[in-house]
Amino acid sequence: MSLNSRTISIIAIVAVAVVCIVAAALILMNKENPNAVKYHLDGGEFVDDYPKRYDPGVVLEVPNPVKHGYVFHGWYTDDGFVNRFDGSTSGIEGALNLYAQWGDVKTGNWMMYDIYGTRDAGMESYVTEGMEKLWIGYYSESRGAYNVFGTGMVTIDYTELGKSGFKILMDSYWMPEMGSFKKVGQETIPTVEGDKVCDVMEVTIALGETWKYWVSDSLIPYKLVHYVSSADPGSVSETETIYTLREKGFEPYPTECKVDVIEGGGIKVSGNKGTYEIGSLILLTAEADKEKKFGGWYDGDMNLLGTEPTLKYEITGDMTIYALNDQRYDSELEPGTEVDLKDVLDTDADWFLIENDDTGDKARTDDGKFTFHEGGYFTVKAYVDEEVKKIFHVTVSGIVTRELSWNYDGHSYSLRLQMDYRDVEYARTYYSPDERRADRPDHVRDKTFVTMSYTDAHMAPYTEHAVDSLISSYRSSHGTVDEYDFLNFLLVFTQNIEYQEDAEYTGYDEYWKFPLETLYDQGGDCEDTSLLFLALAHECSDKLGFENRIALQILPQHAAAAVIISDMEGYDVNPYGFIFGETTATGYDLGDIPSKVRDEFLDKKYYSGLSATVEID
Ligand SMILES: [Ca+2]
Ligand SMILES: [Ca+2]
């Protein structure tokens, strides 16, 4: 069989027609979708509507896809995930290929939360508001948890004290894998990205402490609730903090980590390689000079990591490790004369930074020559280039001036005190941190926080001076001295001292201060200002010839002063006959009992628990 010319021409016509149809189809497709967006979702899917094409030069907004068990990290224009797509379409021609990058771990994701919290704990009740950014770091297989870094700030408004403050949040902690949480339900909640169906997950951290997570879209917590309740005999405190997601994102987390080791005076550390792979172990050895003893290893937030000379520690990110000696200070110096820090600290450095630990004031010296102008406790950092290499502490036994001002009965007052820092240091170190809490059941040590203020040679001169000054100020404005009114004047003085929560300012949950320390710090919490009031009241009454009785009133979540004076007409008394003296909150006269602690003070039934009236002779 052979093809004739007619057949050939038909085939040619058909071939031409096919070419034309294909060309027309291509032209048609191109016309319909000239700038297509092609998604490479790698098993993920869109839940929201998404753009199918782009307009060159116009920013393209693409919603995040989801993939069960994974976290979306971002869009890339290449499958090697080198070029991140930020929405810009300038310069793109033809189809735009977008590749979804997924992380099977949450490492590198950050979430910014709005914080709103309440605490109901008697006089220490407050409302807190602020923000915190949580950045999810290294995942430790052995712990089954992520290292999370939190930074932020909250304001605190004490509802009962009429005072406010703020707290800088800087924290690193281990967050368990969400899989270890208990799923307690499902709930649709409004979020910054619209309504979301969330799994509600719960984990119990300790007795009375839980975290609840509202989780959606590949394990993103849109809302968190931290709840803590603690029950003391006769009193319950509840703290609830709500975190609401405001923004989220991804910042690659370092896999190569830098470790800075900073040595304390007389300590040498060996073994630091400088950089480490995340999750690897660092092995350091500390050696002390003859005159010094090794004290311990600390992280950048001064959390104790260990006290053995050898430290084995898992690297969770860039970090600073301190190897300190066991002394509170390396050198004791006199004020007013120039010293050479290179000599007194026996160290070489390019330059030094000197920080007053109590005031936060900083100074720098490039050649090591420095004059301390007033007493105090200082941290000295020795730098080589821009890196701290050594850290020292110095006490300067000079005079420190403190001035406290307040108003009473339409008059303004101020109390000026000059303290030798040696005496403040004596008070600071008289008791260990462990001994700075209620000494139950006999309260023998508790009383010494007051009595030493007028019996101890280092502290009594300051109480004496303060008392003389307070009596003369009161006399010059009031003339004669009435017992109730004068004690009320002292009470208002203590109420005006800044409220400083122990945990925030001292680093300990409970930390009782001698009155000298409260005056030096110009701050303290309820027991501190109550102890100060009692010391002043005892000495003033002695000088003025009043025969009153004084006591420290310990309540389950609070402390106050209590007194028995000659005329207590019209005031409620506790089972031992004392009237109440609130030293932290303004607006309460002597004898007024804040409603939050009224029952605990007056009702005998609470005294079998933690309430106690500790009389001071
Ligand atoms: Ca306290
Ligand atoms: Ca305290």
Image (cartoon, helix red, strand yellow):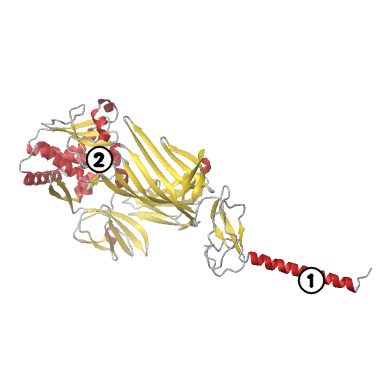
Dividing the image into 4 quarters, which one contains the N terminus? bottom right
Mark 1 Cα shell of 10 Å, populated few (<14), some (14-19), many (≥20): few
> Residue 117, how many percent across, how many down?
37, 44
Question: Between residues 213 and 8, which one lies in front from this camera angle?
Answer: 8
Q: Which callout, 2 or 1, points at the residue further toward the start of the chain? A: 1
User: Which residue in the protein does label 2 denote?
Assistant: 526
User: Which residue in the protein does label 1 denote?
Assistant: 16
> Residue 544, how many percent across, how many down?
7, 38
Can residue 285 be seen here? The reply is yes
Residue shown at 56%/68% (left/top)? 56
Amino acid on which disc 2 is placed: Cys
Q: Quadrant of residue 118?
A: top left
> Residue 32, how many percent across, how many down?
64, 64
Q: Is mark 2 within 8 Å of ligand 1?
A: yes
Residue located farthest toward the left when viewing the structure as drawn? 479
Question: Between residues 129 and 532, which one lies in front from this camera angle?
Answer: 129
